[in-house]
Image (spheres, rainbow, N blue to C red):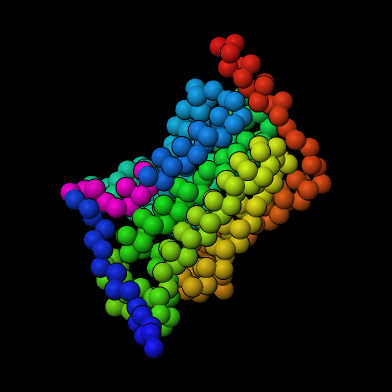
């Protein structure tokens, strides 16, 4: 008879060496993998590398700012009011280096959407056309971020007796010493599976001819729908969530799910393929 695993005793040190943390390594690796995927998308669409680099650099910057401001805006608005400059710096109010503690995925997604709105306007591209292509790549970075959270012993789940529970031995003393749901892994698995599925759908099934809004609609529904459900297994992030029927992450997920449903329905009702936008962008690039 095979014995079941009582729990995983998670003792990984979040710091690899010096000030280099595993989280930073996974975050950087996520951006690299997303860039390599987007590079393949641009090859399929016959878009220039110059446009690829511009889109990549500014998307990373907007994403990071959105992740940081989103955390403090949604979870700690009082800190944002008291220390607005420290939000974008890896230090605390005592000027001690603490790294970037506090990144909200909802803020990152919102920042990406806002930037794509601007970018598509600047280059005369259809917003849904571009959002679909970005949706193919972003989840590999999101999955890596969740693995970074696992290494940091943060965003842990509630106490459980399931055989795959993790005993987090570092991080917040309030969550150590009890086996918990590895919710970081739950989300990472969802993100990686969805990333692989959407990439296969784009590269192999539709062969770039995607009904506008289809891929981004699926992404928003799956990612934030699963996020809404997984939140039931998470430890609360801030004290005020203890009195809420739904936590902050769940309330923030609902609008994104509804937006995803809208995009998906739109893609079904209006099944026209947009390819002429690529030529418009290429012509604009050549004229520079």
Residue at image location 43% in from the left, 63% down from the top: 184
Image position, residue 147 (x, y; %)? 39, 57
The one nearer the camera, 255 or 211, is: 211
Query: Residue shown at 56%/30% (left/top)?
Result: 42
How far across and down, in percent of the image, does residue 217 sit?
66, 50
Q: What is the magenta segment's predominant secondary structure? A: helix
Instruction: Point out residue 72 in the picture as x, y percentages from the top left corner.
Output: 43, 53
Q: Is residue 13 left or right of residue 181?
A: left
Residue 116 is left or right of residue 65, and the answer is right
Asked which quadrant contains residue 1, the reply is bottom left
**Looking at the image, which is closer to me, 85 or 237?**
237
Residue 271 visible (yes or no): yes
Is 42 in the magenta? no
Residue drawn at x 57%, y 46% as measured from the top left: 199
**Which residue, as the protein is rendered here, is positioned at the far bottom?**
1
As displayed, is residue 238 above or below residue 116? below
Q: Residue 252: x, y in percent?
A: 57, 58
Q: Furthest residue to the left? A: 18
Q: In which quarter of the image is residue 282?
A: top right
Quadrant housing the C terminus: top right
Work out whether residue 204 or residue 117 is closer to the camera in this orientation and state it: 204
Residue at the spot x=59%, y=25% of the render? Answer: 46
User: Which stretch did the figure color magenta?
Assistant: 18-28
Q: Horizontally, is 23 left or right of 144 in the view?
A: left
Q: Is residue 100 visible?
A: no
């Amino acid at each position: 008879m095979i014995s079941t695993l009582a729990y995983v005793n998670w003792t990984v040190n979040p710091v690899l060496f010096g000030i280099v943390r595993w989280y930073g390594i996974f975050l950087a690796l996520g951006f690299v993998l997303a860039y390599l995927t987007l590079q393949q998308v641009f090859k399929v669409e016959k878009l220039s590398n110059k446009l690829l680099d511009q889109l990549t650099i500014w998307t990373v910057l907007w994403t990071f700012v959105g992740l940081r401001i989103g955390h403090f805006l949604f979870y700690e608005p009082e800190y944002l009011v008291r220390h607005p400059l420290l939000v974008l710096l890896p230090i605390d109010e005592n000027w001690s280096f603490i790294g970037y503690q506090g990144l909200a995925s909802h803020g990152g997604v919102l920042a990406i959407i806002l930037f794509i709105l601007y970018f598509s306007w600047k280059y005369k591209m259809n917003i849904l056309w571009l959002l679909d292509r970005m949706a193919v790549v972003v989840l590999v970075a999101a999955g890596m971020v969740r693995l970074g959270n696992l290494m940091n012993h943060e965003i842990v789940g509630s106490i459980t007796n399931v055989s795959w529970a993790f005993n987090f031995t570092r991080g917040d003393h309030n969550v150590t010493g009890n086996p918990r749901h590895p919710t970081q892994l739950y989300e990472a698995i969802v993100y990686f599976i969805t990333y692989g599925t959407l990439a296969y759908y784009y590269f192999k099934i539709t062969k770039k001819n995607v009904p506008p809004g289809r891929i981004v609609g699926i992404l928003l529904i799956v990612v934030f729908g699963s996020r809404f459900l997984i939140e039931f297994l998470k430890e609360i992030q801030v004290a005020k969530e203890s009195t809420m029927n739904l936590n902050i992450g769940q309330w923030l997920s609902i609008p994104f799910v509804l937006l995803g449903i809208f995009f998906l329905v739109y893609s079904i009702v209006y099944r026209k393929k947009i390819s002429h936008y690529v030529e418009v962008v290429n012509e604009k690039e050549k004229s520079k």
